[in-house]
Amino acid sequence: MPDLLLELFSEEIPARMQAKAREDLKSLVTNGLVEAGLTYASAGAFSTPRRLVLSVEGLSAQSPALKEERKGPRSDAPDAALEGFLRSTGLTRDQLELRDEKKGQVWFAVIEKPGRAAPEIVAEVVEQVIRSFPWPKSMRWGAGSLRWVRPLHSILCLLTDETGAEIVPLTVDGIAAGNTTEGHRFMSKGRFAVSSFDDCRAKLLKAHVVLDSAEREARIWHDATTAAFAQGLEVAEDKGLLAEVAGLVEWPVMLMGAIPERFLDLPPEVLQTSMKEHQKFFSVKNPRTGRIEKFVTVANRETADHGETVLKGNLKVLSARLSDAKFFWENDLRTVKTVGMEGMAAGLANVTFHNKLGSQADRIARIEALAREIAPLVGAPPDLAAEAARVAKADLQSAMVGEFPELQGTMGGYYARAAGLPEAVAAACKAHYSPLGPSDDVPTEPVSVAVALADKIDTLTGFWAIDEKPTGSKDPFALRRAALGVIRLLLGSGVRTGLIGTNAPIGKARDLHGIHETASGPSGADVNELLTFFHDRLKVFLRDQGIRHDIIDAVLAMPGNDDLTLLVKRAEALSAALKTEDGANLIQGFKRANNILTQAEEKDGVEYSFGADEKFAEGPEEKALFAALDRAEAAIVPAMKAEDFTAAMSAMAALRAPIDAFFTAVQINSDNPVIRRNRLNLLHRIRATCAQVADLTKIEG
C-alpha cells in the first residue's frame, strides 16, 4: 500500500492562516480520496511560512471495482421512458437485460465500474483541492487563473511503496508536479529530490527547515526560557504569540535583548503590549521586581555575528515604538494630574455609545446610579462605588488606550492611582470589564464587583430595551458574555439578590433606561425574556460544572428563580442527592406516583388534593408512608426556610424506601371508591412534598 506525500510550495503564507490551512488540506484531500473509493491508515498535515505538506500513510493502491444494478421501465413502456433510462445509465439497449417480474418483463441495467489506480485518483483530487482551496484571502498572479494565498511555485506529489517513488501525473496552471523541494530561503541553496515523507522531513531539517510547527514552538520556548532562567528572569507566557511567531520562521533562532533603561518605568502591561503588537517580541520580566527588563525576538536565520546586527536593528525600532508609548504615558499622567480623572472623562459626552442609548457619558451616569444601588448588596460603600463608576471609563479618552485599546481598564487603574484616588476605585477601574471570558479571573473586591455588575447589567438591559438581542450565532454586542459575567460575579461573591422586580438590579436599570429620551425600558414581558436569557447562560455555565440541564430545569421551576445564587445552591444540592442510590431511585417512585395521579385526575375530571386521611390506611406499608411523609415535611419546611437545601434533599430522598414498599404492597385503584380516593390523595401528598424542594417532573429517566 503506497504512502502519499504532497507539498505545496509558495511565497510566505500569513502566520494566522497556517493552522486552518493545515487542517483544510488534510480534510479536503483525505475526504476526496475516500469518496473516490480509496482508504488510508493515517494522515498528518504540516506547515511552514512557505509550504503546506500532507503525508497520507497506507493508501490503497486502487479503488474497488463496483457492480450496480438498476431497475428500469417495463418492456411495454413508451420509448421515451426507455431512452431516458439509457441516458441515465450510459448504456445502449443491447446492454440491458429483460427480467420477468409479477407484472411483466422489466428492463434492468447492470453497470460495472472498474477500479481506478491511486495515481489517477490522487491527481484528480489534489487538482480539485488546489483550485478550490478555502483561503480567507487569495490572489492571482501572472497570466494564470489559479488563486492561491501567495504565488504558488511548485507542487511535490509522490506515491511511495516498496518498489520506489512515483510522481503523480498532475499539472495545475502550468505547474507540473515533481519530486523536488527547496530548503531555507537564505541558508540553503537549490532544489533537491525526495523519495518519501521521512526522507523529505530529514532533508528539510538539513536544509534548515523545521517542518512541524509544534516542534518550532517547542524550540522557541525552550531556548527563550533557558536563556531567561540563566539570568534569573522569566519569559511571560503567551501561547497565541508563540504560535504566531512559529508561523513566521522556518529555522527559529532565539535572540534576547535588553530594554533601554529610560523605558523601564513604563507600566509592564504597556511594554508587553507594545512589544507584542508592533514587533512580536516576548516580554522577559524580573520576578523580584515585577518589571519587564528584556525581550526575546525570534530570527529566521543564523548569522555570523550571532544575531548582533539583527538585535541592533530591532532595538532601534523598539526604541522608536517605546518612545511613542512613553510620550502617551507622560501626556496622560499630566492630564490626570491637571484635571483629574473626571476631567479626562469629560470628552466622553461627545462619544456615542449607541445611537439609541446615548453617549458614553449617558451610559456612565446610568452605571453610576446602578452601582450605588448594587453596592449595599455586595458590601461596598455606595459613595465609593459611585465614584469608581464615574471614572472607570475615563481612560477611553487617554492617548494610551487610543493606541492600544486592549489596555482599557488597565490604564484606568494606573491613572486613578496617579490622580490620588482610593485604591478601591483604582482596582475597580481595572477590573470592571472582568470577567471577559470563561477563564478570566472574577473580581472579588466589593467596589469592583459593584461597578462590574452595574456595567454589564446596564449593557444587557439597554440592548434589550432597543430590541438588539442575540440571534442564533450572532451576538455583535457580546451580550452572552455579559450575562455570563453577571452570573460569575454573583456566584463568586455570593450575592443574594433577585435580578428582576422594582428594587432589583434589572428593575433599577430598566427605570434608568426608561427616563432616557431615546430608549424606553423593557416591558414586563421583555424583562422575563431577559431572565430566561440569564437562565440559558446559567445552564451552559453549570453544565460545564457537571450539573445536568434537567436538574437545572427542576430548580428553575421553583419560586425565586431570579436569584441566581439561590438557584445554584438548589441545583448543587439536587445534583448531589440524585447521585445517591436513594435519590436516583426516588425519581422512579415519584414518577410512578405522579403518572398514576395525573391519569386518574384526567379520567375522573377532579383534582385529588384534598388531604389523605390515615384512618383509611389498610396495611403497614400504607401507614408507614403516612409517617414517612410526616417526617419529611417536618424536616423539609424548616430546611427550605433556612435554605439548607442539602438537608431538604436528604429528607426528600429518605422517602424512597417507604414509597417503594407502598407500591409493592398496595393497589391504588381499589374497588372501594373511598380507599381509592384516599390513596390518590396520598399520591398528591407525595407530589406536593417533593415539589417543595424541586420540580421532579423535569428530571429525565
Image (cartoon, helix red, strand yellow):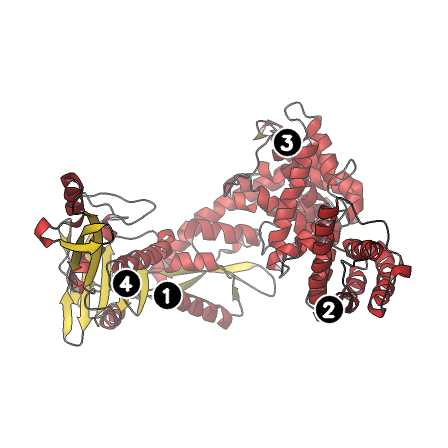
Q: Quadrant of the C terminus?
A: bottom right
The residue singled out by tag 2 in the image is 582
Residue at the extreme right:
615
Q: Which mark is residue 216?
A: 1
Q: State the separation of the CA atoms marked 1 and 2.
A: 55 Å
> In this image, 627 relative to 557: left or right?
right
Task: Residue 56: give x, y in percent of width and height.
Answer: 27, 66
Residue shown at 61% from the left, 29% from the top: 357
The residue singled out by tag 4 in the image is 54
Q: State the separation of the CA atoms marked 3 and 4.
A: 52 Å
Point out the frontmost of discs 4 and 1: 4
Task: Residue 316: give x, y in percent of width and height.
Answer: 40, 51
Q: Earlier in the sequence, mark 4 or mark 2?
A: 4
Task: Residue 303: give x, y in percent of width and height.
Answer: 30, 64
Q: Earlier in the sequence, mark 3 or mark 4?
A: 4
Q: Residues within 10 Å of mark 4 (few under 14, many from 20)?
A: many
Q: Earlier in the sequence, mark 1 or mark 3?
A: 1
The residue singled out by tag 3 in the image is 465
Q: Earlier in the sequence, mark 4 or mark 1?
A: 4
